[in-house]
Amino acid sequence: MTTHSIRKAKLADVTHVQALINSYASGNKMLPRSLHDIYECLRDFHVCVEDERIIGVCALHITWDNLAEIRSLAVAEDRQRHGIGSELVLRCLEEAADLGLTSIFTLTYSREFFAKLGFLEVDKAMLPHKVWADCIRCPQFPNCSETAMTLEMRK
């Protein structure tokens, strides 16, 4: 069995991260990300690497005091259902704890996946307005069918 590892993203990963994210975006499963977006937020990303191939990505993006978003979670189609998505989210949550963040949210089409990780569904209106900056660029705005979910971190 091939093993994988999770690490922070590096500059050499940017085009691979973009390709994986945009493969999901092409199916309207998440927002597309430009190279500029990824370079600008590169330090937000963790990647899962297997045999020198990036097979998964996930970002922890700080939006405000004590608030961050889990976003851009994508796992290569041939590596789904192997726990890689959960590992990536848990790694981001470890980083959130290290940073002292107390509240994490996500906007997702995969409600069951995040519920298994302890996230609870909330009304989108409960999230701060700052959260919606990316939504304006979404082709589904303002008729979004994503579910807003939050996780309160233990202190």
Image (cartoon, rainbow, N blue to C red):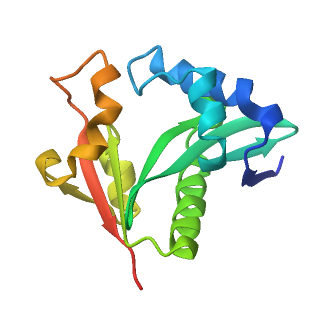
Q: Residue at x 42, y 25 (%)?
A: 31
Q: Quadrant of residue 34?
A: top right
Q: Quadrant of residue 6?
A: bottom right
Q: Is residue 1 visible?
A: no
Q: Position of residue 86 (x, y in %)?
A: 53, 55
Looking at the image, residue 140 lies above or below residue 84:
above
Q: Is residue 121 visible?
A: yes
Q: Is residue 123 left or right of residue 116?
A: left
Q: Quadrant of the C terminus?
A: bottom left
Q: How many marks?
A: 0
Q: Residue at x 41, y 62 (%)?
A: 117
Q: Is residue 60 left or right of residue 64?
A: right
Looking at the image, residue 122 lies above or below residue 135:
below
Nearest the viewer among 73 and 41 is 41
Q: Is residue 135 left or right of residue 27?
A: left
Q: Residue at x 39, y 75 (%)?
A: 153
Residue pushed farthest bottom? 155
Q: Residue at x 37, y 65 (%)?
A: 65
Nearest the viewer among 17 and 136 is 136
Q: Position of residue 33 (x, y in %)?
A: 53, 24
Residue pushed farthest right? 51
Q: Position of residue 76 (x, y in %)?
A: 63, 31
Nearest the viewer among 8 and 54 is 8
Q: Is residue 11 left or right of residue 96?
A: right
Q: Position of residue 62 (x, y in %)?
A: 46, 54
